[in-house]
Amino acid sequence: MKREDLILTLSFLLILEGYLGESTAPALLGFFLLLYVYGLRSVVELKIVGERVLESHQLEEGKPAKVFVRIINGGSGASVRLADPNGEFEASGLGEFYLEPGGEWEGSYSIKPNARGRFVLKPLRALVQDARGLYFEEFLIGESTEVTVYPSVESIRDAARLDYNLKLAEAYKRGVLLGTESLEIKDLREYQHGDDFKRIDWKATARLGEVIVRDFLRESNADVYIFLDNTREMRKGLKMAKIDYASVLALQLAASLVKRFRVGMVIYDDETAELVRPGKGSPQLEAMRRKLAIRGRRGRMSLRFDFETGFGERAREFLGKVLPLKKGRKGSTGVFEGLSMVKQSSYIIFITDLSNPRELYRAVALARRTHRILILSPNPVLFYSGKLDERTLERLYRAYTQREELLKRFSLLAPTIDLGPSDYLRELMKASSGWGR
């Protein structure tokens, strides 16, 4: 309800009260309010015109662009509040200001496209209100304008890295995971003087607009570490816990690699980490097998994937004071302690269900500065073995879609393979036949 309508309603109620109560005071007050409103209406005129000019009609996804606005007040004094109705763009710098009769205002704000493609920008909305706040009216500033939003350089890089990591993950799943392919790890980086031209990745070069080469991690200059997640959620399961499957997979990977590489293992939980130093041969495999006597526990698995990496510098500084860490650690969980134990540049295979994504994301982002990373992730949704009803199916589907987004974000950092119980069948058969000898 407009404020004018509210005053008019109040005046009629006062007049009615005076009439029914045979009292002149309320009626006179109501009549005075009516005169006041109509008197104001005769002198208040809301009228503004203006124009909107874009800095460019070719925008870049995720990059702010300036919009210039000019408004002229052709009526009585009024306050003006601007609003951008284009939901595909994030507007900032819009505010409220006052214009005197005949006054002019010039300013600017920024819009940031959140998607790529062709869009029609709707006119800017201006809500104009008189000085007393009784009358207001909405005006449109500028014309509908067509703009084109191109992918940003960062998004092209992310897409190239995601595409590369997904293909690499698929290659690992077909090869390294089953022990049939040698471990020669590839990565992409910018060309440096002296690099072999045969190592240029022409597809990545075309996408990114700069020369990109393939980088190789040779067998002779890197150890392999298997990081096994033994946190609370990994130990849960109605029949078998994810840690039961993960332990078998870790041992199978170790058996496939220990003949050719120095293989170590880090078993970490919510607070601490235990290291098996890298080595080769059957004695090393036996040392890791003894450390894998991990027992799961019965309990319903969590299907929530909370992900938030938006800590600012001040927040991290505050947490560093509130949660003092052990020497060498850079986080509040055992995975960071495990990373602090790996001193040389190595190849690290994480086996984790991503149930603590914020901490793990920080750990992987930290580790990839020095090491080559592969993530093998048992999917909690695929490991669910409880009763299925309509409510549970809805919950599982919601968790599945959340995890798909989670996997995409981790795949930007490193090749990430989603695993279910069927992916372990061959590993279980191999491992069980080996233990029986």
Image (spheres, helix red, strand yellow):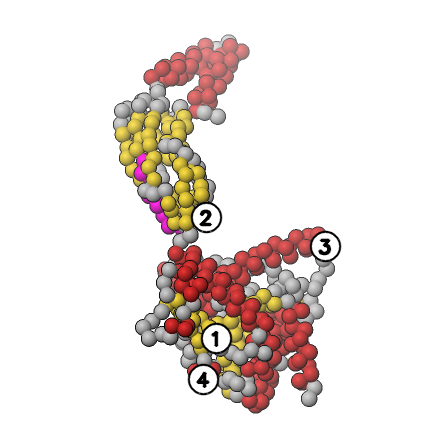
Q: Overall secondary structure of the magenta stretch?
A: strand
Report the residue marked by disc 4.
Answer: 220
Q: Nearer the viewer, mark 2 or mark 1?
A: 1
Circle 3 residues within 10 Å: few <14, some 14–19, many ≥20: few
Q: CA distance from mark 3 to mark 2?
A: 37 Å
Q: CA distance from mark 1 to mark 4?
A: 12 Å
Report x, y in % for residue 85: 44, 37
At horizontal 69% and vertical 89% (from top left) the residue drawn is 437
Q: CA distance from mark 4 to mark 3?
A: 53 Å
Q: Is residue 35 above or below residue 66?
A: above
Q: Nearer the viewer, mark 1 or mark 3?
A: 1
Looking at the image, tell me whether mark 2 or mark 1 is earlier in sequence order: 2
Q: Nearer the viewer, mark 3 or mark 2?
A: 2
Q: Is residue 361 left or right of residue 175?
A: left
Q: Is residue 315 above or below residue 285?
A: above
At horizontal 46% and vertical 59% (from top left) the residue drawn is 159
- In contact (CB < 8 Å): disc 4 and disc 3: no
Circle 2 residues within 10 Å: few <14, some 14–19, many ≥20: some
Report the residue marked by disc 3.
Answer: 389
Report x, y in % for residue 410: 50, 63
Residue 185's mark?
A: 1
Disc 2 marks a residue whose amino acid type is: Ala
Q: CA distance from mark 1 to mark 3?
A: 44 Å
Q: Nearer the viewer, residue 189 or 206?
A: 206
Q: Which residues are magenta?
A: 62-69
Looking at the image, tell me whether mark 1 or mark 3 is earlier in sequence order: 1
